[in-house]
Image (tube, grey):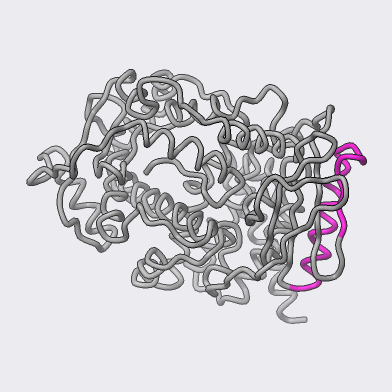
Amino acid sequence: MKLNLKGALLATIAALLVLNVVALRSIDSEPAYPSRWDKQVAPLAAFVEDARHLRFDHAVRISYLSPAEYRKRILGDGEVSLSTAEKEELERFAGQSRALGLIDKDTNLLDDVQDIQANGTSAFYDPETEDIVVFGTKIDVSTRVTLVHEMTHALQDQNFDLSREFSTDGADSLFEALGEGDASRIETAYVEQLNEADSAAYEKSFEESNDDHGEVDVAPILEQLFGAPYVLGEPMTTLYEQVKSTKDLNALFRKPVPSDEGLLNIFSLLAGEKPQKVRAPKVVAGEKRTDAPTPFSALAWYLTLAAHVDERVALRAVDGWGGDSSIGYKKDGRDCIRAVFVGDSPNDVTEMRGALDQWKTAFSAERVSVTGDATRVEVSACEADDIPAPRAGSENSLIVPVSRLQFLQGAFAAGAPLDTVQCLSREFLNYVTVDALLDANEDAKLFTRQAGSMAQACARQKSA
């Protein structure tokens, strides 16, 4: 699937860059489908059908390209051409991102997005041309794993139409995460059934892939936003199907809820919660609005906070997300952004206010303000001369919500009731840190002890 950022903080870049890249390719006729899958990949197609409990309408063309051919297919023959209005919009977005302390003055968003597109992917399924494009010309175990992922996208497209656009950015964002998460879990299922030799070969291929692709050196926030639909989407879709059913997952594909909150708070997705309608923030004297009101998104709140405060503080605050709205504006010739957060309860508003009060200490007081009342919190930020650098380790901030989803998956699998799993979700943030999660990769017993402490805490609360 083509990487897409609609519905998250980078909606502007998605519209200006990703769609512009697609426009570089000319589509002169209807896609031509092969009569059957090539014999080398037919077993993969059968695996995808069985694992996903869906059927292909037809095979799709697969192209194996050299590095130069692959880059050309993604980026076209030359530079992405932006109109004056598009350049101004991109510059405003960059200024707003700097105002939030997400990128520095040296970050070139256009170059970074193109770098990720060309060097951060090993294959993609293109819904416009309905074909799969693969980086590399040999079919080894790593290629087979990649093909399973992309064939899942082809299967999704034939059953749910991946080119659909929805009436809200939130639905677009969730739909993308459903697609990438679903494909990633089918890919994982394929990897888990590899024999010992193929499994070893696949592990070794990771060490070689970076040499083939080259290093991707981009702003961490961009890597996180591009990666979120994959790393958060996989446990989200796995949990949703696990707790509900494949039929319910398919129904969610057909009609996604209009927010990305489920990427972080699985309980909101399981309950089918919809965001509240939030009154857009206003400009005051001396300010000029530059953008129409748009959603900010739960994921954007988390990543914005986690760039400058502890991930656990950020995730606790976003767990209470009920809806939001944001605008861009100019003040004293500088780009600014104002976003409003509404919680599920007054306590959630208080939690977010506390997190934002911590967050704003990283910034110049005259450039950032946090205001509000018992029903909403409003943050305003303008680009400053001294942009605070994200705190050390914040590039790993997604590991906390990802690990929590995986932990809850295990709790549901063990038969824990919903109220116990909800308690474990809260307690997870009392016991786990990024360092502990990274250490747990080396010492599984460490996380087992932490999990035991969480369970004991929930048992005490239940008996109290």
Q: Quadrant of the C terminus?
A: bottom right
Question: Who is closer to the viewer here, 441 or 112?
Answer: 112
Q: Residue at x 26, y 63 (%)?
A: 53
Is residue 168 depicted above or below 66 in this figure? below
Q: Residue 282: horizontal and vertical position, in percent?
A: 78, 57
Q: In the image, is 368 to the left or to the right of 137?
A: right
Counting from the top left corner in percent of width and height, residue 309 is at 78, 45
Task: Reply yes or no: does residue 351 show up in magenta.
Answer: yes
Magenta stretch secondary structure, dominant: helix
Residue 97 visible to the viewer: yes
Q: Is residue 212 magenta?
A: no
Q: Can residue 194 be seen from the camera position used here?
A: no
Vertical order, 418 against 340 (above or below): below
- Kindly give the residue lying farthest to the left in the view shown: 35
Please, which residue is most extreme toward the bottom here?
Answer: 463
Q: Which residue is drawn at the image coordinates 42% and 56% (left, top)?
A: 165
Total number of numbered labels?
0
Nearest the viewer among 336 and 115 is: 336
Q: Which quadrant holds residue 352?
A: bottom right
What range of the chain is rendered magenta? 345-371
Residue drawn at (52%, 71%) of the image: 270
Q: Which residue lies at the image location 85% right of the left edge and 36% below the top edge?
A: 332
148 with respect to 439 (left or right) = left
Q: Quadrant of residue 191?
A: top left
> Residue 286 location in percent, x, y?
87, 45
